[in-house]
Image (tube, rainbow, N blue to C red):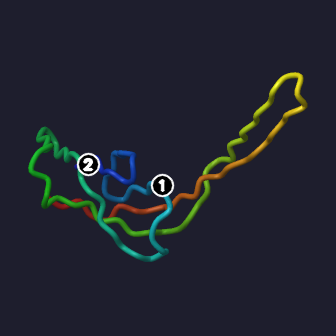
């Protein structure tokens, strides 16, 4: 059994025991539920009437994504700008998928 959940503006496919990274959220050790978009159980696919369905996750830690370098340059003006960014993520472990 697996489910497609929404976290922020992204959707991810999860199963029980998976560890996924979502945008920075709650503190370590907390549990929370993620909204379900679709549930697949063998040959049965459920995509409607999921208001009662939920995926319970446990927060395991915080991480950062890869460093992204942003460079801007304009020819013949002497303008150069360099900036870096690392997105903050929260690692969560899927503990339960309920319908």
The answer to which of marks 1 and 2 sits earlier in the sequence is 2
- Residue shown at 44%/69% (left/top)? 59
Left or right of 81? Residue 90 is left
Callout 1: helix, strand or loop?
strand
In this rendering, the answer to whether 35 lies above or below 43 is: below
| Residue 92 drawn at (x, y percent) | 43, 62
Looking at the rendered structure, the secondary structure element under dot 2 is: strand
The quarter of the displayed image where residue 29 is located: bottom left
Q: Residue at x 53, y 68 (%)?
A: 61
Circle 2 packing at 10 Å, graded few (<14), some (14-19), many (20+), is some
Residue 12 horizontal/vertical position (percent): 36, 46
Residue 88: give its label.
none
Q: Nearer the viewer, residue 25 or 1?
A: 25
Q: Which residue is mark 2?
A: 2
Total numbered labels placed on residues in the image? 2
Mark 1 highlights which residue?
21
């Amino acid at each position: 059994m697996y489910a497609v959940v929404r976290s922020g503006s992204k959707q991810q496919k999860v199963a029980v025991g998976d560890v996924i990274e979502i945008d920075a959220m709650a503190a370590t050790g907390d549990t929370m539920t993620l909204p379900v978009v679709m549930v697949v159980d063998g040959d049965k696919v459920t995509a409607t009437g999921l208001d009662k369905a939920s995926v319970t996750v446990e927060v395991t830690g915080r991480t950062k994504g890869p460093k992204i370098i942003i460079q801007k340059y304009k020819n013949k003006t002497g303008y150069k700008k360099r900036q870096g960014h690392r997105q903050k993520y929260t690692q969560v472990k899927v503990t339960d998928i309920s319908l």
